[in-house]
Image (cartoon, helix red, strand yellow):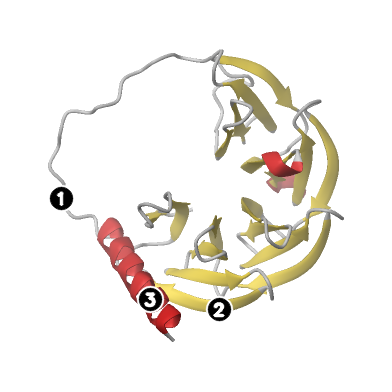
């Protein structure tokens, strides 16, 4: 009971933070603490880029180059391109999972998830993943990949050992980004109808839906470190 109360309080706090973050209230302009360290020329021209994923252990940044249909791999220590993963048409989402020795990318135009070997940069498997695969999240306890099927209004669940779809979770709206919350061990999805969906990865069922006041068509979603315990969500029209 005490644990349930703590979770409820935590959830209410997080939802209030989401509401504040999406309200668009004025913020004082301050001098930026950021500075340009290096410009790294990327492959495939200047067409649209999308999600990125950082493998801190290998010092590699994986960049989905949607317009070129490739995933570009950058050595973050050398500040140079290592190579490109070819034939990932409409690359939207990308996710490095070092403990599996795999990188996953949504090849949206092919309605697939590409399974990539980070050593050879070759696609070693392809999984059909709904109508419009986009964001990706990995739940380590159950060995499953969760794929935002934006137009299918669902999350497609893939078993990473067999590379087979094992479930589809309806979301009651178009799916934006999908993230795994390591604190609650749940999958969170920004849903365009204006809410945050919570999925239980042990049963692949929709646990709850939290309304997000002030967010029009929420799409981007990120989870900060455990010390901060905040969710951030972006709104926009897609």
Q: Position of residue 8 (x, y in %)?
A: 38, 78
The residue pinned by badge 1 equals 26
Name the mark nearer the viewer: 2 or 3. 3
Mark 2 is surrounded, within 10 Å at the Cα level, by few (under 14), some (14 to 19) or many (20 or more) other residues, namely few
The residue pinned by badge 2 equals 207
Q: Position of residue 192 (x, y in %)?
A: 48, 64
- Secondary element under disc 2, as helix, strand or loop, is strand
Q: How many marks?
A: 3
Q: Quadrant of the N terminus?
A: bottom left
Residue at (52, 63) in percent of width and height:
188
Q: Which mark is residue 50?
A: none
Sequence-wise, the earlier of marks 1 and 3 is 3
Residue 229's place in the image compared with 47, above or below, is below
Residue 143, image quadrant: bottom right
Label 1 close to label 3 by CB (< 8 Å):
no
Mark 3 is surrounded, within 10 Å at the Cα level, by few (under 14), some (14 to 19) or many (20 or more) other residues, namely few
Sequence-wise, the earlier of marks 2 and 3 is 3
Sequence-wise, the earlier of marks 1 and 2 is 1
Residue at (68, 73) in percent of width and height:
204
The residue pinned by badge 3 equals 6
Residue 123's place in the image compared with 33, above or below, is below
- Secondary element under disc 3, as helix, strand or loop, is helix
């Amino acid at each position: 009971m005490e644990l349930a109360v703590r979770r409820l309080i935590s959830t209410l706090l997080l939802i209030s933070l989401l509401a504040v973050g999406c309200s668009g209230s004025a913020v004082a302009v301050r001098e930026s603490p950021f500075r340009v360290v290096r410009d790294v020329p990327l492959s495939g021209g200047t067409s649209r880029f999308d999600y990125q994923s950082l493998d801190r252990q290998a010092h590699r940044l994986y960049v989905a180059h949607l317009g070129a249909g490739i995933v570009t791999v950058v050595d973050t220590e050398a500040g140079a391109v290592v190579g490109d993963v070819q034939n990932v048409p409409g690359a939207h989402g990308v996710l490095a999972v070092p403990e599996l020795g795999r990188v996953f990318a949504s090849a949206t135009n092919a309605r697939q998830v590409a399974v990539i070997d980070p050593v050879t940069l070759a696609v070693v498997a392809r999984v059909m993943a709904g109508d419009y695969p986009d964001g990706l999240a990995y739940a380590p306890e159950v060995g499953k990949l969760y794929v935002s099927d934006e137009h299918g209004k669902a999350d497609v669940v893939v078993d990473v050992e067999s590379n087979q779809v094992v479930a589809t979770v309806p979301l009651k709206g178009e799916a934006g980004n999908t993230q795994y919350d390591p604190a609650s061990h749940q999958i969170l999805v920004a849903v365009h109808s204006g809410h945050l969906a919570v999925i239980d990865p042990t049963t692949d069922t929709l646990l709850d839906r939290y309304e997000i006041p002030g967010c029009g068509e929420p799409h981007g979603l990120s989870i900060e470190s455990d010390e901060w315990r905040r969710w951030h969500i972006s709104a926009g029209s897609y």
